[in-house]
Image (cartoon, rainbow, N blue to C red):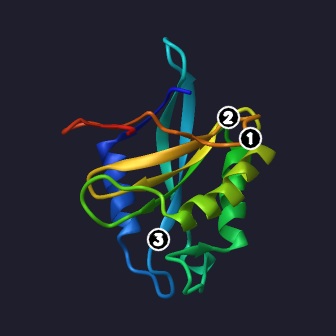
Amino acid sequence: MNTIFKITQRLRADILADLSRPHGCAAERVGFISCRVGPLSGGGTVILAQGFHTVADADYLDDPHVGAMMGPAAIRKALQLAYNQPFSMFHVHLHDHEGQTGFSPVDLRESAKFVPDFFNVRTGLPHGALVLSRSAGCGLCWYPGLRRPTALAKITFVGAPLTLIQSQ
């Protein structure tokens, strides 16, 4: 499936700034990006990032086995947002380095546990997970009715400078 994720440089900068803040018990921060979805003329889907929703400090669990563990309140708040508005939701976190990045085994395992929960409140839209580095990113997208996620074909950071990241 051809899936393109687009985010403005401004929103990306705001997300990177938030995810770079230290946390009392977590080694990294996480959040959610609310998105709108549309069809591509040649087939496929474009996902347009609209807003960033940080996970509140109190909604992290103290788990030294992972960089960040969200508690049920964090997921409940993101689910509520998707329920209230027709948003596609993408979980996001930062791997704090330059260049291409990827999902760790923990990232893959944990996102597979909670991303499909968004189909319970917003059934007709894709949902996913995104990992950003300082200069790149990668993502996975779950579509309604499909068991496994597909990799984002492209991520575009729109604005000056325009950045296009092709999936490998």
Q: Left or right of 109: which side holds 152?
A: left
Local packing at callout 1 (Cα closer than 10 Å; few below 14, some 14-19, many 20+) is many
Q: Position of residue 59 (x, y in %)?
A: 62, 75
Q: Which residue is the extreme one toward the top?
A: 41
Asked whether the beta carbons under mark 1 and mark 2 sit within 8 Å of each other, the answer is yes
- The residue under the point 51% across, 26% down is 2
What number is the disc on residue 139? none
Please, what is the three-letter code of the amino acid marked with disc 1?
Arg
Q: Secondary structure at mark 1?
A: loop
Residue under label 3, please give it: 29
Residue under label 1, please give it: 122
Above or below, 27 against 3 in this view is below
Residue under label 2, please give it: 125
Please, what is the three-letter code of the amino acid marked with disc 3?
Arg
Picture quadrant where residue 96 is located: bottom left
Q: Quadrant of the N terminus?
A: top right
- The residue under the point 48% across, 35% down is 48
Q: Quadrant of the C terminus?
A: top left
User: Sequence order check: which comes first, mark 1 or mark 3?
Assistant: 3
